[in-house]
Image (cartoon, grey):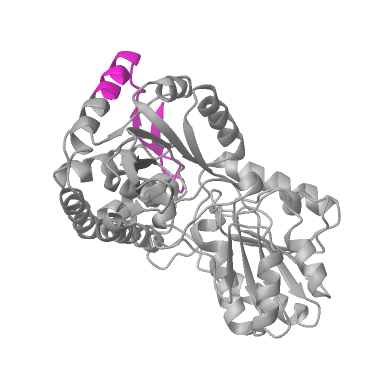
Amino acid sequence: MYKTQNPFTQVVEKEFDSISNDVLDEKLSLANSAYAKWRAETFQTKSKLLYAVANLLEERKDAYGRIITTEMGKPISQATAEVEKCAWVCRYYAENAIDFLKPRRIESSASLNQIVYEPMGAIFAIMPWNFPFWQVFRFIAPTLMAGNVGLLKHASNVPQCAQLIEQVFIDAGAPEGLIQNLFIDYNQVETVIASRTVKAVTLTGSNNAGSKVAQLAGKYTKKSVLELGGSDPFIVFDDADLNKALENAVLSRFLNNGQSCIAAKRFIVHESIAEEFIANFQSLVENFIIGNPLDGDTFIGPMVNQSAIDELLVQVDASHKKGAVILTGGTVHEDMKTIFLPTIMVNVKRDMPVWKEEVFGPLAVIVVFSSDEEAIELANDTIFGLAASVWTDDSDKASYICKNIHAGTVAINGMVKSDPALPFGGINESGYGRELSDYGICEFVNIKTVSYF
């Protein structure tokens, strides 16, 4: 069952049934037919479609943003910004895909060698609720420009977002079957992955879901890309621009109500500035505007559902019992029970859930370090490896720290964020493969060697 349940009001606004196996078979057949035609289209035709989609996204950003907020609770200003970012990635690949995929000549014993990049077929995407438009568009824009077609199984709590994404392509003139939304249940996921029509699968989501999908992809010998959880360190050295670091710290941790894989989650601060950092950080957090996410000024709105609140409460309570100190927050709002108050915890030790586990909500933990090596060791003390942020005015130190942090992305004196031009992905239990940039488009193409002797 797919349903829109407003996270702020808890009202169920719409419900959608899962499709039957017969309908699923029809959609897979349609994807196969669409691919046979789309793969032969020119880059110019594909670019024209993505430019048209980008224009529609910008025209409809307010309406789409409202649906995003209604379905998963993101503050409305951030929801409309998410739609705008989707237009950006469409234009990026519309403009650059032809260069990314142009044939390359390689010298060898043959008289002529070429590496060519060819589409694969239907790519199956299993996408999360926290960025319900962006996560899909950063997959579908390069997928379509490469000549593939897309099949989308979206999170069950954002069904209207899934429908709108399919519809915006139709409205832009996409041929039938180019991108299809699948309201399928978990048992049908294996049917899709097993289908001969589907050549690869990509998932953004939990580690548990990623593990199951990776097993299925392996079972049916399908390429897979996984973007999973993160527990990103945010390291602040004593020579950092503290005001800039603080400004980015609160944004990185609390955007999207803290429900982001690349949010800074563990703040690792030099002992000489820790007191000042903590005091100012707390002051900023306690002045957030909290309330209805459809209000334009709201910065902290509801968690996505009660289960997410309960999980966060368990992590906070268990860590508090082990000795962690709650400076602010740590519970739900007194009047608005769907909102978890922005929380800061200190005196955090490594055996505590808020350190060991991914914290998916508005909670920041702060620890103190005294040496560069200790900062590196703390940063790498995680099962994840998605991203990290390092703050220092010493370029040599920044380079040294960057080389020794285990992550897919390191931002120096800036907030970690995804950009269409930059490869994005993690290592360890944060997954494998890359999205975005030329690396992302090449994940789902056949890199073919052609040799003339």
Q: What is the quadrant of the N terminus in the image?
A: top left
* Residue 35 position by quadrant: top left
Left or right, 270 with respect to 91, comes to: right
> Residue 302 in the image: x percent, y percent?
50, 52
Q: Nearer the viewer, residue 264 or 220?
A: 220
Q: Determine the residue located farthest toward the top in the rendered image.
A: 22
Residue drawn 82% across the image and 55% down it: 350
> Residue 2 in the image: x percent, y percent?
39, 30
Left or right, 280 with respect to 25, comes to: right
Report if residue 286 is visible in the image.
Answer: no
| 135 inside magenta stretch | no
User: Where is 357 relative to 20, above or below?
Assistant: below
Q: What is the quadrant of the C terminus in the image?
A: top left
Magenta region: 1-29
> Residue 377 in the image: x percent, y percent?
79, 62
Q: Nearer the viewer, residue 45 or 251?
A: 45
| 26 inside magenta stretch | yes
> Residue 304 in the image: x percent, y percent?
50, 46
Q: Nearer the viewer, residue 108 or 396?
A: 108
User: Where is 433 relative to 263, above or below?
Assistant: above
User: Where is 245 relative to 120, above or below?
Assistant: below
Residue drawn 60% across the image and 45% down it: 309
Residue drawn 46% across the image and 42% down it: 128
